Amino acid sequence: SAVISQKPSRDICQRGTSLTIQCQVDSQVTMMFWYRQQPGQSLTLIATANQGSEATYESGFVIDKFPISRPNLTFSTLTVSNLSPEDSSIYLCSAQTGGGLRNEQFFGPGTRLTVL
Amino acid sequence: AQSVTQPDIHITVSEGASLELRCNYSYGATPYLFWYVQSPGQGLQLLLKYFSGDTLVQGIKGFEAEFKRSQSSFNLRKPSVHWSDAAEYFCAVGVGGSYIPTFGRGTSLIVHP
């Protein structure tokens, strides 16, 4: 299993600023991900955080808006840049452990972002 | 591309009653199927998953789900609901070797005493 922590748990930011969210996993994992959960909506995958290389972004998400770092196998950051009220969401970090049929995906508690 | 439909936005049940949450998926081959629960202020927790084999899957907290290929469904059930089961429930489908889940919109479960 994997225990995932995120910092901050919530923040209120002004329009035009940026917020960096940290994700720490208590064990080494192969794959880490970032999701967005907009109010009353489901989870949408933003990107896969690749260790030592550029993240892989899903359609509709770009590196300039959501730069991601993953310096090692237990840590990743997501920055939400040039904030607008539409960015108000919960951002969740996720990690996969195991392999094949033993694969399991774990989620952090989320970071609730409010943009004024 | 795969997709997941959870037709019920809210479900209200009385404590002790049985529960069934609906999930339908769209995918050309046999998918990997998941149910997650999200309690207020908490991250998502995996309840159960189906990869292959027995189509009736047992999970944690007394939940089970049945994969029905003919109906493209993976409904979640519990015979007797507890007040602590009140939460948001997400069905998800994964495809390919990466098993990365695509989530449905979620069903909010309300439990009346």
Image (cartoon, coloured by chain):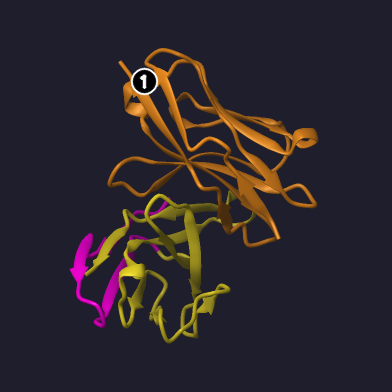
Chain colours: A yellow, B orange
Q: Residue at x 50, y 76 (%)?
A: A61
Circle 1 residue: B82
Q: Closest to the observer: B28 or A85?
A: A85
The image shows residue B21, relative to residue B88, as above or below, that is above
Give residue A50's position: percent from left, percent from top: 49, 77
Q: In which quarter of the image is the N terminus of chain B?
A: bottom right
Q: Which residue is drawn at 43% across and 28% down?
A: B61
The image shows residue A98, relative to residue A86, as above or below, that is above
Q: What stretch is highlighted in magenta?
A: A1-27
Q: Quadrant of residue B113?
A: top left
Can residue A106 be seen here? The reply is yes
Q: Is residue B113 left or right of residue B76?
A: left
Q: Closest to the observer: B41 or A69?
A: B41
Q: Which amino acid does label 1 sit on?
A: His
Give residue B85's position: percent from left, percent from top: 37, 28
Q: Can residue A14 be found in the magenta stretch?
A: yes
Q: Which residue is drawn at 40% across and 82% down?
A: A67
Give residue A35's position: percent from left, percent from top: 44, 63
Mark 1: which secondary structure?
A: loop
The image shows residue A7, relative to residue B20, as above or below, that is below
